[in-house]
């Protein structure tokens, strides 16, 4: 199949040109086809959420196991009321506080969304994105849109249209390029079908944010670093994920010790003949460039700038793949409001290989 490429400036979705592109995209969705589009978190691969065949196509294009449910994207609160078996006060509170925005809510299903979309579950993940292009696409299509991240299963999520093209060119009907996404980490998932509200995937909205609104919030024990043997509730969090092709090791500890260990370990690896890269802050990059040779130093953002580090994380992991890197060493980035969400992805990418110095 030939994939159509179009560009929409998120600041200009109301122009006739953008509207014409969105009309065409909406037609594709209504006809059961697939359109990749930008959201504030990562790019999504969208299809009509109520169309079983469209969901099957999404799994096929991504090479994703069909027991891993999709998120249903909406553009009005009324759509949540139709999708959920019952509309609860907690849903209203979360919607009021965080929608439109980077939050996904798991609710009991009314049965409207087919099992092909929910991976056979009787619960549904629902998200109301704030990105103007995502919002306009859902509205113009007249449907709710099932959309996983628009990457090949197992690869880092796409934060620019070029990443989507690399993974899905020729496999989907259309890609809408809306530039680099804002946040760069997938949405926070909150499960409201349990006794207490539970975070199934950390993201830009933190457990404290949710707690402030609902009075309580626990974290799925399956996703915390200490419990590598507990099964996460979100099926997608069980798979190897976010992984670059190279083996990645995280080095944590005091600043000077980490710098020294990054330099030594990377030089050892390079001397052994492996194409080696270091992922680090701009400040550390400066120090390492002066100290090492033959190693690719990749800057992820300014030290301590969690928003910038999150926005660059997946692109940096993809760059390692593009450059044919075989061995990666990275600093650790737990500082800041969303440090926990960043480390959740990085630790998975490293397959839990962490050295403390
Ligand atoms: O930011 C995002 O959420 C992006 C953009 C495109 O909106 N989408 C995204 O979708 O990250 P995906 O499919 O890559 O991740 C969805 C996650 C998976 O881990 C999946 O297992 C989980 O949500 N999930 C979906 N429905 C669920 C359900 N009913 N119960 C538990 N987990 C669910
Ligand atoms: Mg994904």
Image (cartoon, grey):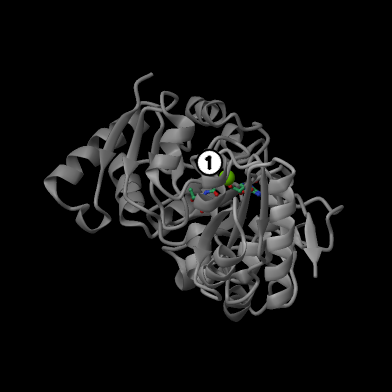
Does the rendering let one see residue 79?
Answer: yes
Q: Name the one closer to the observer, 276 or 289.
A: 289
Q: Nearer the viewer, residue 106 or 276?
A: 276
Q: Residue at x 53, y 45 (%)?
A: 318
- Left or right: residue 73 versus residue 235 is left
The answer to whether 278 is drawn above or below residue 33 in the figure is: below
The residue sitting at 57% across, 70% down in the picture is 287
Residue at the left extreme, as displayed: 16
x and y percent of residue 116 in the render? 59, 32
Q: Is residue 356 above or below residue 216?
A: above
Q: Position of residue 220 (x, y in %)?
A: 75, 61
Judge by depth and name the residue closer to the eye, 116 or 325.
Answer: 325
Identify the residue at horizontal 46%, vertical 71% (top origin).
96
Q: Is residue 154 left or right of residue 80?
A: right
Residue at position x 66%, y 65% in the image: 331
Q: Residue furthest right?
A: 229
Res 110 seen here? no
Quadrant the C terminus occupies: bottom right
- Quickly name the residue at label 1: 323
Q: Residues within 10 Å of mark 1 (few under 14, many from 20)?
A: few
Q: Position of residue 13 (x, y in %)?
A: 22, 52
Residue 290 position in % (x across, y down):
56, 66
């Amino acid at each position: 199949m030939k994939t159509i490429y179009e560009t929409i400036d998120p600041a200009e979705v109301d122009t006739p040109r953008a509207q014409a592109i969105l009309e065409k995209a909406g037609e594709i969705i209504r006809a059961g086809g697939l359109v990749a589009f930008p959201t504030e978190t990562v790019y999504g691969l969208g299809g009509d959420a109520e169309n079983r065949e469209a969901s099957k196509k999404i799994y096929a294009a991504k090479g994703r196991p069909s027991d891993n449910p999709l998120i249903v994207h909406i553009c009005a609160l009324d759509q949540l009321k139709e999708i959920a078996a019952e509309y609860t006060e907690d849903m209203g509170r979360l919607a009021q506080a965080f929608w439109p925005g980077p939050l996904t809510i798991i609710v009991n299903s009314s049965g409207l969304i087919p099992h092909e979309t929910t991976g056979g579950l009787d619960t549904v993940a629902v998200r109301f994105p704030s990105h103007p292009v995502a919002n306009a696409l859902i509205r113009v299509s007249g449907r709710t849109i099932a959309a996983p991240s628009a990457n090949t299963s197992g690869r880092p999520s796409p934060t620019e249209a070029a990443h989507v093209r690399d993974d899905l060119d020729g496999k989907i009907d259309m890609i809408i390029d809306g530039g680099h996404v804002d946040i760069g980490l997938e949405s926070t998932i909150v499960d409201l079908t349990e006794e207490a509200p539970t975070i199934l995937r950390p993201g830009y909205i933190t457990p404290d944010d949710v707690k402030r609104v609902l009075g309580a919030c626990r974290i799925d024990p399956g996703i915390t670093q200490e419990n590598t043997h507990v099964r996460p509730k979100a099926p997608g969090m069980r798979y190897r994920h976010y992984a670059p092709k190279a083996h990645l090791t995280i080095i944590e500890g005091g600043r000077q010790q980490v710098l020294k260990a990054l330099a030594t370990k990377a030089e050892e690896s390079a001397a052994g003949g492996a194409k080696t890269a270091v992922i680090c802050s701009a400040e550390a990059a400066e120090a390492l460039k002066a100290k090492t040779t033959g190693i690719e130093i990749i800057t992820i953002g300014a030290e301590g700038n969690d928003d910038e580090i999150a926005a660059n994380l997946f692109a940096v992991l993809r760059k390692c793949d593009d450059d044919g890197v075989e061995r990666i060493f990275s600093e650790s980035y737990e500082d800041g409001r969303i440090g926990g969400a960043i480390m959740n992805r990085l630790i998975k990418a490293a397959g839990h290989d962490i050295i403390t110095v």
